[in-house]
Amino acid sequence: MNDPNSAYLEEVDLHEGRIIEDLKANSRESIPDPDAWLAEEEVKRNVLLTSVDWLIDWARRSSLWPVICFPACCAFEFIAAEGPRFDLSRFGMELLRASPRQADLMITAGTLTWKMAPAVRRIYDQMPDPKWVIAMGACGISGGIFRSSYAVVPGYNKIVPVDVYVPGCPPRPEGLIHGIQMLQKKIAKEKMKPQLPKIKLPGIPRLKRPSA
Amino acid sequence: MTVALAAKDLVVKLAEKFPGAIEEAGRDALLVKISSLLDVMTYLKNTPDFNFDYFNFLTAVDYYSFFEIVYHLTSTNHNHSVFIKTRCYDRARPSVPSVVSLWQGADFQEREIFDLFGISFTGHPNLKRIFLWEGFDGHPLRKDFNR
């Protein structure tokens, strides 16, 4: 090829290949689902939920904004769910965010190939906390009928932690909405764990206690 | 409706022009020797009687003992089409002349065949993988591919 950039383009291709191979090598094991805390006794009895927790959970579950990340055909069921007939916006989800930085829910609709996997992983990494993932459809859960393929990721939980699995090929919009409601119920149980940055405060001179 | 040219009719004209180049004329496909593939293709495209100006697709078949590369050509002027096949017996280093110089549309499809079958197309301007990533081991549409 007479392109003056051909050496650079070749390097880009090799770089992409290295990224994919790295991701593939690092994702042989499934990432465990982030639901261990649901089994805790306190959560079950729902006793430690303060009113602040309740308010924050209410705000979070009522405005789940999905990011646009729909690699394959389950996206059409999502589009149907988003449309006027099923009307997902009843649940506070009317806003699809094109930028992952404004989203907190990832609905992984469809087959994921290894070539696409680094992009999905990057979208997930760019989403701000708190964030949740719904694996939609058979391919999202396990790779589906393409599981044994050389090019397909066998389930999104190899790449990102998944909160809710919605089975079906594809799941009907009602199924997806049910999955979203399950996620909302899960969020309703969450406790706030404030993680403040550890700042070393300057020493404050202490008052001396008056003696006697 | 596009008329599929009978290979028997076509082979008479081609055999005059390229003696020994046509190995076999089936019911609807011509089997061309790989050494004269590019000449035959050029002739089919540029001769006014045939004028195959549209390249439908290109694909390949793995028969274990050889690869068969299949070209589907159409003429938009005469509204006829034909299948051209060629065989490549070298399994370790299969190589076929590229037809990108004749039909630009063959570019990505030859890259696809290169990617999935490992057949290299000599004269292709940018022969590299198109579906799979660089560093992928093997060519998955070969019959002996094991993951």
Image: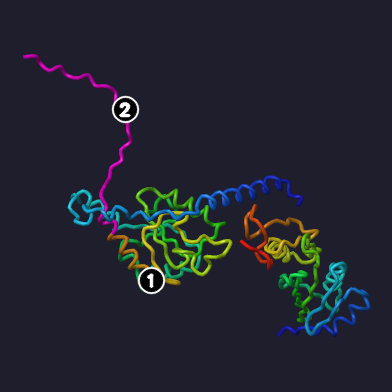
**Residue shown at 89% from the left, 78% from the top:** B14
Whole-number angstrom distance, CA of label 2 to CA of label 1: 51 Å
User: Is B27 rendered above or below residue A119?
Assistant: below
Q: Amino acid at mark 2?
A: Lys
Q: Is B26 contained in the magenta span?
A: no
Q: What's the magenta bit mostly, secondary-structure-wise?
A: loop
The quarter of the picture where the N terminus of chain B appears is bottom right
Query: Can residue B70 be seen in this snapshot?
Result: yes
Q: Position of residue B108 (x, y in %)?
A: 69, 63
Query: Can residue A54 be seen in this snapshot?
Result: no
Question: Residue A200 has which mark?
Answer: 2
Q: Which residues are magenta?
A: A186-212
Question: Residue A173 has which mark?
Answer: 1
The local secondary structure at tag 1 comes to helix
The quarter of the displayed image where residue A211 is located:
top left
Q: Is A192 contained in the magenta span?
A: yes
